[in-house]
Image (cartoon, helix red, strand yellow):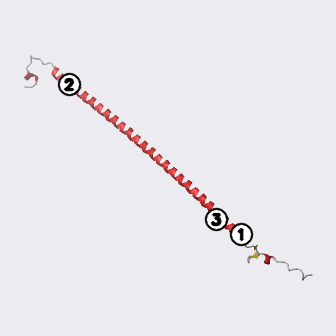
Amino acid sequence: KAQEEPPAKLLDDLFRKTKAAPCIYWLPLTESQIVQKEAEQAERAKEREKRRKEREEEEQKEREKEAERERNRQLEREKRREHSRERERDRERERDRGDRERERERDRDRGRERDRRDTKRHSRSRSRSTPVRDRGGRR
């Protein structure tokens, strides 16, 4: 009876095993499994590449938006600076105008003062009874 039964197949006969302890038993992939696995890997690689490109495009768009915002901020700063310069020029014009007006006022006051002095000299009454020499005036 023992000779009629074929010998039992051991794990070593059915699988491959690692040399390291503890042993791990494994089977190599078939050709169709290899092809299928390589196709899946290629598909995952394409998906990764597609996502990477999409991410790069989004980042590029974001950089462009940021650059546009920076240009707008720069233009706004320049407008504010120009507005400040204009206000400063207006203030200077007002100061100059005020200075000119004060100067004109001073000139008018000086002229009036001069006129008053001149009129005082001329309006001084002289007595005709006393000769000019006795008065200490001009000869």
Q: x, y percentage for residue 86?
A: 38, 39
Q: Which label lies toward us, 1 or 2?
A: 1
Marks 1 and 2 close (CB-CB < 8 Å): no
The Cα atoms of the two marked residues, 1 and 2, are separated by 123 Å
Q: Locate the C terminus and report the quarter of the image it occupies.
A: top left
**Residue at the spot of label 3:** 42
Depth check, front residue: 136 or 33: 33
Dot 1: element: helix
Q: Quadrant of residue 100?
A: top left
Q: Residue 64, percent across and down?
A: 51, 52
Query: Which residue carries the number 1 mark?
Result: 32
How crowded pointer 3 is (Cα within 10 Å; few <14, some 14-19, many 20+) is rated as: few
Residue farthest front in this picture: 32
Dot 3: element: helix
In the rendered view, does 127 fall on the left or right side of 113? left
Image quarter where the N terminus lies is bottom right
